[in-house]
Image (cartoon, rainbow, N blue to C red):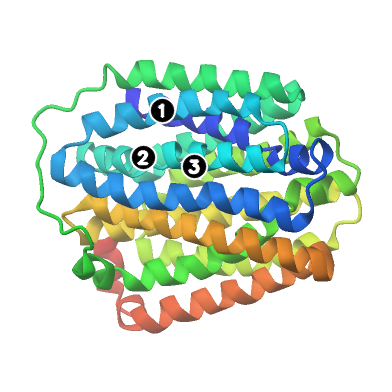
Amino acid sequence: MKASSIQLLSSAGLSASSLLIPNIARDQFGSSSWEIGLVVAGYSATAFMSSYVFGRFSDVHGRAFVLKLGIFLTALATLLQLLANDTYTLMLIRLIVGLCSGIYPATLLAYVYDKDKKIGRFTSYGSLGFGFGVFAAGAIGIYWGIFLFSSIVLFASYSLALFLPFGQEEHHKVPFFPVAIIKHNLSIYLSIMFRHTGACMIWVIYPIFLADLGADPLFIGAIYAINAFGQFVFMQLCDRYAGFLLIIVGFVMSILTFPSYTLATVYYEIIPAQIMLALAWSTLYVGSVKFVMERNDEKGTAAGLLQSTLSISAILGSVMGGVVAQLYGYHGCMYVATFVAIIGLIIFVGHNRQRIGSSKNLNSAGQ
């Protein structure tokens, strides 16, 4: 339960501090869509680096130090956001937050998998925390208050991490650039990179899109919370199903969800799409984590590479989303996102068609 509480609180703190960053950049500092894309991409770039480096470090040297250090530094870094006074200081501080926030998630995932293997239930608490965080950010509304709230919640998460039992940890010898692990999991890393790049094209402009449809900050937070609370429900149901099946369902639901955003003409019409999105990400993310955990002894490294893949996608998607939104508007981002998600599904099915076709393998993967 402590690990789930750490996941909930750390997710709440991070999501609250991130929700209105695009709105702050545009409304407070006059940032363009291109500059907003760079702010979001910078955060993901540093998270990408630290996710891999510290995921591997936890396999080689142990998980306890990495987990505690990461949450503590993230709590401090969110406070720095109070100092932002233009686009470029905001970008610099978000680089620092990304670097710190990438340190611990893979280590926490590996710790939980080693304990009871119930990844779906554990990750659902991250979604629950995300929901609470974005709703709180929308309710608070005042930027300095949001950042202060985020830091307090993250320090609470750190205090719980101090009492987490680690026991005798198994260490692994992992090369700095683990080619074998990357090749072994390439199909999921590459396919999810395409899908998540498309998703992040939408997310970089999503709060602004909602605002232009008439949503106020409270409703923007509520819209994000609907997705998060939906994930909390769906993820807890995912542990019983095979990883391959979950991944395919996640891709199909993503391909249906992304273009559905273009149908909304007022902000409240977006709600059904948020529920579809919750199912899409729940199945895809839990399936992906199960995929890499079941196939690798070096779980911290494999999970770190998965988190790094998501960060690469966020970098590419944020930059592409800023450019596409500048040239073709919000709907252009949503259509391009659908196309790249289709590419991701083709890559995954192409690499794993024999496994997918084998009911024996599907059943064993779901155990």
Q: Where in the figure is residue 170, as x and y percent of width and height?
A: 9, 41
Determine which residue is flagged by label 3. Answer: 98
Residue visible at 61% across and 66% down in the picture: 198
Determine which residue is flagged by label 2. Answer: 103
Separation of marks 2 and 1 at Cα, in angstroms: 9 Å
Q: Secondary structure at mark 3?
A: helix
Ranked by sequence position, the earlier of labels 2 and 3 is 3
Q: Label 2 crowding class (10 Å Cα cut-off): few <14, some 14-19, many 20+?
A: many
Residue flagged by tag 3: what amino acid is it? Gly
Q: Secondary structure at mark 2?
A: loop
Quarter occupied by the N terminus: top left
Q: Label 1 crowding class (10 Å Cα cut-off): few <14, some 14-19, many 20+?
A: some
Tell me if residue 271 can be seen: yes
Residue flagged by tag 2: what amino acid is it? Ile
Q: Secondary structure at mark 1?
A: helix
Measured along the vertical axis of the image, is residue 4 above or below residue 351?
above
Q: Where in the figure is residue 104, as x and y percent of width and height?
A: 35, 37
Separation of marks 2 and 3 at Cα, in angstroms: 9 Å
Measured along the vertical axis of the image, is residue 174 above or below residue 136?
below
- Residue 73, numbered label: 1
